[in-house]
């Protein structure tokens, strides 16, 4: 994503934050030589050294806007990324999207086997909550973060969206149904990333909370609209995952539902909506504003 960044201060912040997150993930994952070694090695393979780390960046951008302690942000960012990594491992399995390439590498079930991939996803999900439970600080705010992450990941969030997605193969969805699906499948975890950052401060006003929720909803949907555009406009090598997969699997997407031009207009409208949502936060949300731009303007 850094190739879409024109602002040197933002590029530096992203690089530093991504390094902090990498270190936090490295520290929280079991070592590969701890029994069961094959499972631990595969968990590390699934998580480390890849991905844009968009969700952790959102955690830090929101958290820093409200003065959240860095140690809590590290835990929150790692927890969200662990959930995301688990979802990718399961999504790539033969019983779901059946893909062989992820983050430029063979998918976990290809590199290891199906049973290991299933267990990797299970174990990463448990690890995410364990990681967040040890975030320190006020127990009430940690509990609020745990609840938000659980809701975002479960059947009223990402897993529910995935269920709708799997049931939608070959089905023509209307724009509203498509939006409802993506708000769960992709939007819920991205929104949780923003909200966990804010909640980590332990001190969010009602107004600030509403502004963050509104920003998160716009950015969460924009991410998916852009993902659908990239799926038709970008090659496999750049994406690090198989391009053109949605059309191949006859899945409804923004591009198939609205067309390419209207999808691009929608992404731009959502980018502006994200900026507007931040207005009540005055100047404190610069990084969040920049990330909204990046999510819409990214090339992979
Ligand atoms: C298996 C419960 C379960 C859910 C899977 C995340 C997901 C739900 C499916 C992934 C399929 C997909 C391509 C979704 C579209 C948006 C998305 C989540 C893309 C991948 O996220 P990125 O681009 O990936 O942030 P990196 O590798 O950069 O972390």
Image (tube, rainbow, N blue to C red):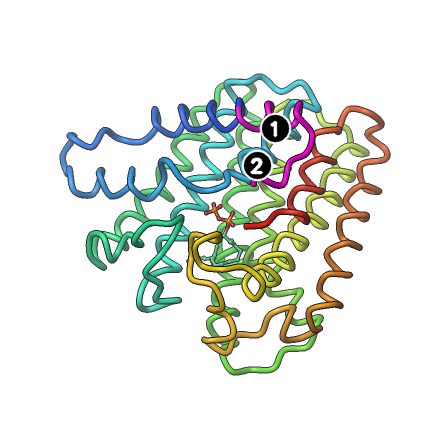
What residue is rendered at 28% in x and 52% in y? 108
Q: Position of residue 147 (x, y in %)?
A: 54, 40
20 w.r.t. 48: above or below: above
**Total marks drawn?**
2
Q: Which residue, given by chain and number where applicable, does mark 2 sit on?
A: 2
What residue is rendered at 38% in x and 44% in y? 125
In the image, is residue 253 part of the stretch drawn in magenta? no
Span shown in magenta: 1-15
Q: Nearer the viewer, residue 272 or 106?
A: 106
Around disc 1, counting alpha carbons within 10 Å, would you say few (fewer than 14), some (14 to 19), or many (20 or more)?
some
Which quarter of the rendered picture does the N terminus lie within?
top right
Q: Secondary structure at mark 1?
A: helix
187 w.r.t. 23: above or below: below
Around disc 2, counting alpha carbons within 10 Å, would you say few (fewer than 14), some (14 to 19), or many (20 or more)?
some
The disc placed on residue 177 is none
What residue is rendered at 46% in x and 68% in y? 245
> Going by the image, does 104 lie left or right of 80?
left
What residue is rendered at 45% in x and 75% in y? 249
Q: Position of residue 155 (x, y in %)?
A: 50, 59
Q: Position of residue 30 (x, y in %)?
A: 26, 30
> Going by the image, does 24 lie left or right of 200?
left
272 w.r.t. 140: above or below: below
Q: Secondary structure at mark 2?
A: helix
Q: Nearer the viewer, residue 139 or 35?
A: 35
Question: Residues under labels 1 and 2: Cα distance?
Answer: 6 Å
C-beta proximity under 8 Å, tags 1 and 2: yes
Q: Is mark 1 within 8 Å of ligand 1?
A: no
Q: Quadrant of residue 23?
A: top left
Q: Position of residue 59 (x, y in %)?
A: 59, 32
Q: Which residue, given by chain and number where applicable, does mark 1 sit on?
A: 11
Q: Quadrant of residue 124?
A: top left
Prevailing secondary structure of the magenta residues: helix
């Amino acid at each position: 994503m850094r190739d879409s960044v024109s602002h040197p201060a933002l590029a530096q912040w992203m690089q530093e934050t991504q390094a902090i997150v990498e270190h936090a993930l490295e520290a929280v994952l079991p070592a590969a030589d701890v029994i069961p070694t094959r499972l631990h090695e595969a968990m590390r393979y699934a998580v480390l050294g890849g991905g844009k780390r968009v969700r952790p960046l959102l955690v830090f951008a929101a958290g820093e806007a409200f003065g959240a302690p860095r140690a809590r942000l590290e835990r929150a960012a790692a927890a969200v990324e662990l959930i995301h990594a688990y979802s990718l491992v399961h999504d790539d399995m033969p019983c779901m999207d059946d893909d062989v390439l992820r983050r430029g590498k063979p998918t976990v079930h290809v590199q290891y086997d199906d049973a290991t991939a299933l267990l990797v996803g299970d174990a990463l999900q448990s690890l995410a909550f364990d990681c967040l439970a040890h975030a320190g600080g006020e127990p009430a705010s940690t509990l609020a973060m745990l609840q938000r992450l659980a809701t975002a990941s479960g059947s009223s969030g990402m897993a529910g969206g995935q269920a709708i997605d799997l049931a939608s193969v070959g089905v023509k969805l209307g724009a509203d149904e498509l939006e409802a699906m993506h708000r769960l499948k992709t939007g819920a975890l991205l929104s949780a990333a923003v909200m966990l950052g804010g909640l980590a401060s332990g001190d969010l006003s009602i107004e600030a909370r509403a502004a963050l929720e509104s920003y998160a909803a716009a950015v969460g949907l924009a991410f998916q609209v852009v993902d659908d555009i990239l799926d038709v406009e970008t090659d496999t090598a750049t994406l690090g995952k198989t391009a053109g997969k949605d059309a191949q699997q006859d899945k409804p997407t923004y591009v198939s539902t609205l067309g390419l031009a209207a999808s691009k207009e929608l992404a731009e409208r959502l980018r502006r909506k994200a900026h507007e949502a931040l207005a009540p936060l005055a100047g404190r949300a610069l990084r969040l504003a920049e990330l909204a731009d990046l999510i819409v303007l990214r090339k992979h």
